[in-house]
Amino acid sequence: MENKTVKPLRHNGSTDINSSGRDSTTENFRSRTVETNTNFSAVLNELESLCIAKGPGLSNQRQVREVIEERGIIRVCHFTRIENLESMLSKGYIYSREELESLGINRIDNDPRRFDGHKKYICCSIMRPNRFLLSKWINENTDGRNDWIVLCIDPQIMARQCSFSSVNAATGGGQHIREGIEALESMFANTVTNRRGIITRPSGREKYFTTDEQAEVLIKGRIPINERYNKVKGIRYEKGNLVVERKIRALLNENALDLQIAPTEKEFFIHV
């Protein structure tokens, strides 16, 4: 068998040594590598933007992200009964009403009537749940227990294909529901009008809270439980409810999920 000599790799020109005693060719290579990595990071950032589901456009997505950052919004909330958590974790998604029906998934519906007319969307709120509505449903429980949980979602999901309502989405059969950055900003306006009349934004209200506590974010499609982007970040339950806590922990272990869970004061769930 013929032996072949492997020639060493050569570069054109001589090798210069700079004042630090380093090979200039190596230094140039390192410089190009840093530049390439920087460009690659920029590309990854742009790809991250594009990973968000198709929406009104990249310009709108950037504007939504700016609102999220400027207002210090750290979560979007979706509340549901503990009984629904098992299918969410096992399937890996929070599904819209339409998809739940098409897939035949058993669940307890929060609002069977959906007067907002947007069954392709998942109803959420910014920073805290709709405490007026949640209080009503908790009080309607025949056993008097608060078996409701709040799923805390990455707020960047609002840069997806979402609609916004400055008041309860069912108001006027959904006539306040709109898309775009102006619709999002209207949720923080100095005044909004709901079915009871004009609401004036309280002085000193934290800038991440909406003017009307019943304002809603409607997220189209499904919300991932454990994907890299726009996912559920944690679960909140009423402090002291050990039954619900045990159920959450058992379901997380069963599905090998590492979501943050946090006991939360009653005021987070019920308007007092």
Image (cartoon, rainbow, N blue to C red):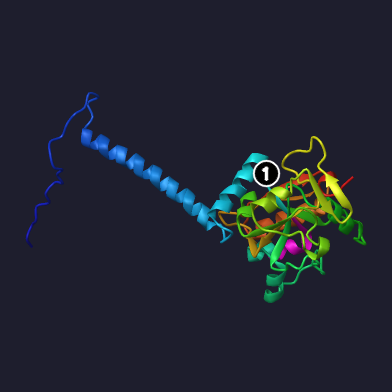
Between residue 78 and residue 9, name the one nearer to us: 78
Furthest residue to the left? 2
Residue numbers of the magenta segment: 78-87
Between residue 253 and residue 196, name the one nearer to us: 196
Image spot of residue 187 (x, y percent): 74, 49
Between residue 265 and residue 166, name the one nearer to us: 166
**Who's the residue at 61% across and 53% down the image?**
159
Name the main secondary structure of what is drawn in magenta: helix
Image spot of residue 38 (x, y percent): 40, 42
- Magenta stretch contains residue 83: yes
Q: How many callouts does the rendering have? A: 1
Inspect the image, locate mark 1, and give the three-letter code of the amino acid beneath it. Ile
Q: Which quadrant is the C terminus positioned in?
A: top right
Provide the residue designation for mark 1: 73
Q: Which quadrant is the N terminus positioned in?
A: bottom left
Image spot of residue 236 (x, y percent): 75, 49
Between residue 218 and residue 247, name the one nearer to us: 218
**Who's the residue at 80% across and 49% down the image?**
192
| Quarter where residue 139 is shown | bottom right
84 relative to 140 in the view: left or right: left
Q: Secondary structure at mark 1?
A: loop
**Who's the residue at 67% across and 41% down the image?**
71
Image spot of residue 72 (x, y percent): 67, 40
**Who's the residue at 72% across and 68% down the image?**
119
Above or below 5: residue 105: below
Is the residue marked by circle 1 packed among few (<14), some (14-19), or many (20+) residues within 10 Å? Answer: some
| Quarter where residue 57 is shown | bottom right
Furthest residue to the top? 19
250 relative to 57 in the view: left or right: right
81 relative to 3 in the view: left or right: right
- Magenta stretch contains residue 216: no
Q: Is residue 50 visible?
A: yes
